[in-house]
Structures are given as structure tokens and as C-alpha cells.
Amino acid sequence: MKVAHLIMAYKEPKQIERLIQKMSHKGSTFYIHVDKKIDSRPFAYLGKLENTKLTQTKLLVNWAGYSFTNAILQCIKEIFETGNEYDFINVMSGQDYPIKSNEYIYKFFSNNIGKSFLSYEAYGSQWWKSAKHRVEKYHLTDFVFKGHYRIQQFINFLMPKRKFPLSYTLYGGNCATWWTISKKCAEYIVDFIEKNPGIKRFAQFTWAPDEYLIPTIIINSHLKDTVVNNNLRYIDWSLGGANPKILLDNDLQSLEHSDKLFARKFDMERSAALLNQIDEVIIRKV
């Protein structure tokens, strides 16, 4: 059983190094995409770590833009082109960290080959009530220039509500960005978007398509029965807003009792004590 861990990075190479070293395993390979707008030189040494590669794909990523989803898709294509056979593609950020041992994680995935793990809610849920503007209105998130918000407002004043190009039920959520999916599922997503350019054009003018596009494609496909509605990540949204809480040492007990495999998000300095406690208290036990 083999897993390709795709790490989407834009800061703190030392934190990413710690993540890789903690998750290093014979069945794991790490692929690191460094945002093109960031100086990649401080990350170069990571490519010398065992079973770790910096992706040749280097794309500029805008927060909440389609550029982030596109970077993931292009990196998955690059992973496939290596010719290495993987059972799962596991997408992580550099601020993730395991809360189970490598042996536990390996056994879990070995027992679930063919399944995919992502979190989603169907259109009409409480989350979608506040998020539907993402797909109904035009967003110029990836088109950063002076006055683009004003132009965006003008476009939405003139134009009718947008509709998803296909007669699909939309699925998504604030935990839908990070996931672990089967190779078959990853192949289907890449192939689907390449064969349906209208989907890409639509998503390019939506807000945060990483939180709805991939779940929507998968759950409307023949692969829906292979999906478990659980992204295996502990994420704390209790503070509200567009970003999850930074986990600190007072979160140890919650992590200790969680059945998730990974957690996010951690800050290199603010979460240092908690990361040490995870190593000493949690991972040693499982």
C-alpha cells in the first residue's frame, strides 16, 4: 500500500520538514508544491529528504482562487506521470500534522483501499446558505489588479445569477479542501475537468472552489459509493471567520480523544508546545 502525500506549501519549510520526518514511512512519498509567488530557495533542501520531491509544477496561488485547485490538479497529473503506483493521494498543507502513529495510519489505509475520504454537505445545508454566493455571483479572485473589486460589483449588478454548467447537486463545506482519495478517484477528477472545459471556466470566476468543486464532481459520479463523508482531519472552526483556529497546547485533550488521523492548523511558533505534546503523549500511544 502506497500513499502520495501532496503538500501545498507557501511558508515555514522547517515546519514542513518536521511534518515529513514525523510521517516518514516505507509506503509514503511526499510531493511539495511551493507557491510560485514565494522564494522557493529556502524549501530546496526538502527535496533531499528521503522519499521527498519538490514538484516541477510551480503555479502562483491566490487564496480562495481557482488557482489553488488548479495547482492541486496539475500536481496530481505530475504524480501520475512519475509512473509510481499509489493507492491514495493525500492532500495536505504545510500546517497539518499527524495525530496517529505511522503504523496506525498505514494500517487504516491498507484496510480501506478503494475508498476516498472527504467531507461535504449537500446544497441547501446551513453552510451553503451562507456560501451560495460563491457560485451564484462572479468573483475575480484570481484576477488581482487595481479596482478589481469594483469591477466585480459592477459585473454582478448587470449579470443574472450564475448556474453550475451541469445539472448536478452541489456539494461542499468548510472542511472540503483537504482530503485523501483513491487513485481511481483522482484519475477521474483530472480526466473530468480536462474533458469539461466549461467547468473550469465556471470555477475560475467563483470564490473558493476548493471547498465545493471536487466534492461536487465526485459525489455526482459513479464513484460516489466509494466515498466516506469524513476527511480524517481534526479542524476547529469554533472562532468563526474564513480560517480555522490555530491549535495550541490547551487543545491537547481534544486531539487525544479524536478519531481523526491528522489535524490542522498549526503554527510553527505558537503551536510548538502542542506539537511536542502530540509526539510525546498521543502518537506514542497509537
Image (cartoon, rainbow, N blue to C red):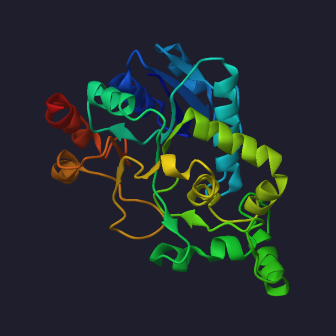
In this view, the residue in front, 286 or 241, is 286
Residue 12 relative to residue 151: left or right: left
In this view, the residue in front, 178 or 123, is 123
Q: Is residue 51 above or below residue 185?
A: above
| Picture coordinates of residue 30, whole percent (x, y) | 51, 25
| Picture coordinates of residue 116, whole percent (x, y) | 48, 43
Q: Which quadrant holds residue 213?
A: bottom right
Q: Is residue 279 above or below residue 205?
A: above
Figure quadrant of the C terminus: top left
Q: Which quadrant holds residue 43?
A: top right
| Picture coordinates of residue 148, whole percent (x, y) | 78, 69
Figure quadrant of the N terminus: top left
In this view, the residue in front, 65 or 84, is 84
Q: Number of marks in the image?
A: 0
Q: Residue at x 22, y 48 (%)?
A: 255
| Picture coordinates of residue 160, whole percent (x, y) | 81, 84
* Residue 61 seen by the camera: no
Q: Residue at x 22, y 37 (%)?
A: 278
Q: Residue furthest bottom?
A: 157
Q: Residue at x 14, y 35 (%)?
A: 281
Residue 277 relative to residue 265: left or right: left
* Residue 264 seen by the camera: yes
Q: Residue at x 55, y 18 (%)?
A: 47
Q: Is residue 284 above or below residue 134?
A: above
Residue 48 relative to residue 112: left or right: right
